[in-house]
Amino acid sequence: MKIYLVTPKNPASFWTYDEILPALGRRCIFPNLSMPTVAGLTPREHEVVLCDENVEEIDYEMEADIVGITGYIIHKPRMLEIIAEFRQRGRIVVVGGPYASLCPEELRNHCDVVFVDEAEETWTRFLKDFEAGCWESEYRASEKPDMTLSPMPRFDLLNVDRYHALTIQFTRGCPFNCEFCDIIVVYGRRPRAKSVAQLMAEIRECHRLGAQQVFLVDDNFIGNKKLAKELLREMVRWGRDNHFPIDFNTEVSLDVAGDEELLELLRAAHFTTMFIGIESPRTASLRETKKHQNLRGDLVESVRRIHAYGIQVQAGMIVGFDHDDELIFEEQLRFIQDARIPVSMTGLLQAMPKTPLYDRIERAGRLVRETTGDQFVLSNILPERMSQRRLYEGYRWLVDQLYDFGNYRRRTLAFLLHRGRLARRGSNLRRQDLRRFLRILDHTVLRASPRQAWFTISLLGTILVRRPSAFKEAVSFALSHRAFFGYVRQLKGRLDRAIADLGVEERGEVHRPGSSTPSLG
């Protein structure tokens, strides 16, 4: 059979870095790992073609026996468009991924087959059923799969040179119980892992394909600290033998700050950045959302302790908790500045389907059907301690302040000047870095606004004088600011429209207990 596996285009967000991709010479920051994983599960007698709409056009005329589509809830509108196009052409369309797992009822009438939960066992069963002509309309995993049995993803089917980084996965699941998080709903609270040998084979394959950056997309890489340390020791050995050709990034919980051995191993293995869900500097809000792992110490000191190992913390922050009032916006800004966090992905609280938060807000009658059609930017929760209008106005002010030239420059310089030593860089300064540097200067100085150009020159000049060893990182931060500044400009426009729609008297169709469940699409 011929199988066409399609990943839809990502909507603009803090993660997409759309404005700076030309400067990087890339079309997307990193690929969704779902489709290379499904391709790896597919028996080799079948022909598999991957298509990522972020880096190439979809071929709707592809003569495929099966078209597979994946995506998150944010991809829903585009997923439905792609499904409709292929079904109009008579193709069998199957859909899986996080959105299908959380909301299969919203997809059943649109496609031929829905896959709920992880597909390690159900995908191969479906292929056998399909060949026999007796497939089912829904496949649901009976239990969480053993990841040690997972074959290597088909990285070789990706257009590797179109991505800034490649992605791999060591574990699924997270041991914590944050109220708003859909990870524990989809993947469970018991971390499941591949073997160290499996992960090292994937790292070697990424290296063979030319990757210089690899993102471990684990829900929480240190969910099993003992196993994480075992992998890291092997990564250090491999890196030393190969002159450390790859820099790594991942997602962890803030309790990493309390484990010095773990931090030293992360630095030695060349982890340069870690995304951490800090969520809020307000203790009551953390306690409300059951983010207990963030209550064990001073948040600013925890972040600075990680920075002391030369590792950048990218923060996930949220406003709109029930314990947030109108003072939270200034508190958030002050915390991010004090903690010297250059990059903060700050968003409004969303009640995701099937999560404990969704159930609680639904019971309280505070679930909102947005009238603006911008559900993925706005909150679907009526706030407890401020008006909806004030929440949007405060959030607009906060993101504007976060990526203001002065605020961003101050905390970026503070991070670069105070962070600890990096691991020995080995051969990480590559010939192509000079070409990339010249492209970046073109985008951040020569073709930038006067303010952006002055910001870049000022940041790089200060670092050259005060800490020249951090110059390469300063260039990256200057370029990243252009991406964030551009996205925040779009975001403020969308928030302005939402605020205008609310008017003097706030409007919004509120979901009351007993009424039909609102769609997040």
Image (cartoon, rainbow, N blue to C red):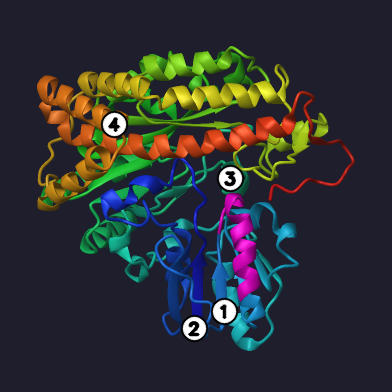
Out of 65 and 441, give the one closest to the viewer: 441
Residue 2 image label: 2
Please state the extent of the stretch shown in magenta in the rendering.
71-85
* Residue on which disc 1 sits: 66
Residue 238 spot, x, y in % from top left: 18, 50
Q: Residues within 10 Å of mark 4 (few under 14, many from 20)?
A: few
Residue 188 image label: 3
Q: Residues within 10 Å of mark 3 (few under 14, many from 20)?
A: some
Q: Is residue 289 visible?
A: no
Q: CA distance from mark 3 to mark 4?
A: 49 Å
Q: Residue furthest front?
A: 450
Q: Is residue 18 visible?
A: yes
Name which residue type carries label 1.
Answer: Ile
Q: Nearer the viewer, mark 3 or mark 4?
A: 4
Q: Are marks 2 and 3 in contact (CB under 8 Å)?
A: no
Name which residue type carries label 4.
Answer: Pro
Horizontal side, residue 384 vs residue 511: left or right = left
Secondary structure beneath dot 4 equals: helix
Name which residue type carries label 2.
Answer: Lys
Residue at 82 percent of width and 33 percent of height = 363
Horizontal side, residue 310 vs residue 508: left or right = left
Residue at 14 percent of width and 45 percent of height = 428
Residue 245 spot, x, y in % from top left: 17, 50
Residue 206 drawn in magenta: no
Secondary structure beneath dot 3 equals: loop
* Residue on which disc 4 sits: 450
Q: CA distance from mark 2 to mark 4?
A: 52 Å
Residue 73 drawn in magenta: yes
Asked if residue 474 is positioned above or below residue 354 in the image, the reply reads above
Horizontal side, residue 87 vs residue 333: left or right = right
